[in-house]
Image (cartoon, rainbow, N blue to C red):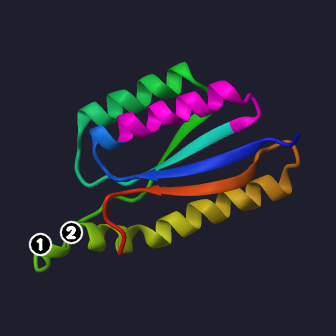
Amino acid sequence: MKKAELVFIPTPGISHLVSTVEVAKQLVDRDEKLSITFLIMKINFDPKVDRFIDSVSTACNRIRFIHLSKYEPDPNQPNNFFVSLIESQKPSVKEEVSRLVSRSESSPGLPTLAGLFLISFVHP
């Protein structure tokens, strides 16, 4: 069976990240051919998030993290924060997913993208 990769895009914040990483750990523990990449949307500097990512990266080599460009909220639209955040990150997500697909197509030993999960309470 070929190696597979899942991409998770959690809502920013430590609580969403911790719970989603716990699910990812369970998945990779059950299947040695599975790897998971997290696309991390950063809205501000949170040392807890960075420390958590560092500890998971050290403990599990089949879970990795890619930081998307930092989101700068529009002060003129404070009521549309999550919609604006997701819309602003679409180009970065497309770029990273395209990079993952191209990489797996050019290197047969690398995992193939098998799924993309947006973990969010808000969907535009």
Q: Quadrant of residue 63?
A: top right
Q: Residue furthest top?
A: 59
Q: Quadrant of residue 20?
A: top left
Q: Is residue 14 magenta?
A: no
> On the rendered structure, is 3 left or right of 85?
right
Q: Viewer-proximal residue, 1 or 96? A: 1
Q: Residue at x 71, y 53 (%)?
A: 114
Q: How many marks?
A: 2
Q: Main secondary structure of the magenta part?
A: helix
Q: Residue at x 34, y 53 (%)?
A: 11
User: Which of the image's four quarters has the N terminus?
Assistant: top right
User: Which of the image's four quarters has the C terminus?
Assistant: bottom left
Q: Quadrant of residue 110?
A: top right
Residues packed near mark 2 inside 10 Å, few (<14), some (14 to 19) or many (20 plus): few
- Where 99 sits versus 58, above or below? below
Q: Is residue 29 magenta?
A: yes
- Where 50 sits versus 67, above or below? above
- In magenta, the rendered stretch is 17-34
- Where 47 sits versus 114, above or below? above
Residues packed near mark 1 inside 10 Å, few (<14), some (14 to 19) or many (20 plus): few
Task: Return the x and y of residue 49 as percentages of the image width and height.
Answer: 31, 36
Secondary structure under tag 1 reads helix
Q: Residue at x 29, y 62 (%)?
A: 71
Q: Residue at x 72, y 60 (%)?
A: 101
Task: Return the x and y of residue 46 as percentages of the image width and height.
Answer: 23, 40
Contact? badges 2 and 1 (CB < 8 Å): yes
Q: Identify the disc placed on residue 78.
A: 1
Amino acid at pointer 1: Pro
Q: Residue beneath label 2, please?
A: 81
Q: Identify the disc placed on residue 101.
A: none
Task: Return the x and y of residue 115 as percentages of the image width and height.
Answer: 64, 55
